[in-house]
Image (cartoon, rainbow, N blue to C red):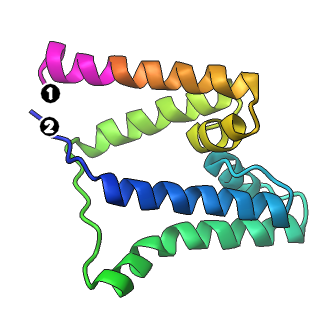
Amino acid sequence: MIETAFTPWASLWGGVLIGFAATLLMLTVGRVMGATGVLAGMLWPSSGQDFAWRAALLAGMVAGPFVAFALTGKMPTLEVPVSPLLLVIGGLIVGMGVTFGSGCTSGHGVCGMARLSSRSIVATLTFMSTTFATVYLVRHVIGG
């Protein structure tokens, strides 16, 4: 059985940092921070300036664990309880969801909900309901 650690302080600070980053991006660049949209725009940027802010944001995401190490003296723990094949399959499913849902959890759940976007509220309710159902099935029906 997979056990999920309850980490309220780390989760709170993570949420505060994501909200701050999203607000800062909106104030400085005028763009909504959806991670998959940022990455897709990095692969096919519309201009050099568009590439620059996307590269800076993604570099900050990659640097996060190293900043945590500098502040705490230990790297964040990462446990992946599934095979590489399941990670690839999961990534493809998420990619399809992002495409069909016109955005990802950070875009809809953080930025869209903050703007009271009805499309984002529906998207967030949909992916949260699907997440709850998937966790229930995997942990209690299939027995993962």
Which residue is farthest left? 1
Taking the spot 66% from the left edge, 67% from the top edge, the residue there is 57
Residue type pointed to by label 2: Ile
Q: Which residue is mark 2?
A: 2
Mark 2 touches mark 1? (CB < 8 Å): yes
Q: Is residue 80 magenta?
A: no
- Residue range in magenta is 134-144
Q: Quadrant of the C terminus?
A: top left
- Along the line of sight, the residue nearer the viewer: 58 or 127: 127
Q: Classify 81 as above or below 64.
A: above
Q: Which mark is first along the chain, 1 or 2? A: 2
Placement of 110 over or under 118, stated as above or below: below
Which part of the image, by quadrant, shows the N terminus?
top left
Looking at the image, residue 57 sits to the left or right of residue 135; the answer is right
The quadrant where residue 138 appears: top left
Q: Secondary structure at mark 2?
A: loop
Extreme right residue here?
47
Which amino acid type corresponds to the residue marked 1 in the rendered image?
Gly
Q: Is residue 101 visible?
A: no
Q: Position of residue 71 (x, y in %)?
A: 37, 84
Residue at 49%, 75% in the rendered image: 63
**Does 72 sit above or below residue 82?**
below
Residue that numbered label 1 is attached to? 144
Residue closest to the eye, 67 or 59 = 67
Residue at point 63% right, 47% down?
36
Give SS at disc 1.
loop
Name the spot of residue 19 as percent of width and height, x first: 61, 55
Answer few, some or many: residues within 10 Å of disc 1's Cα (few below 14, many 20 plus, some between 14 and 19): few
What main secondary structure does the magenta stretch of the protein show? helix
On the picture, is 62 further left or further right than 58?
A: left
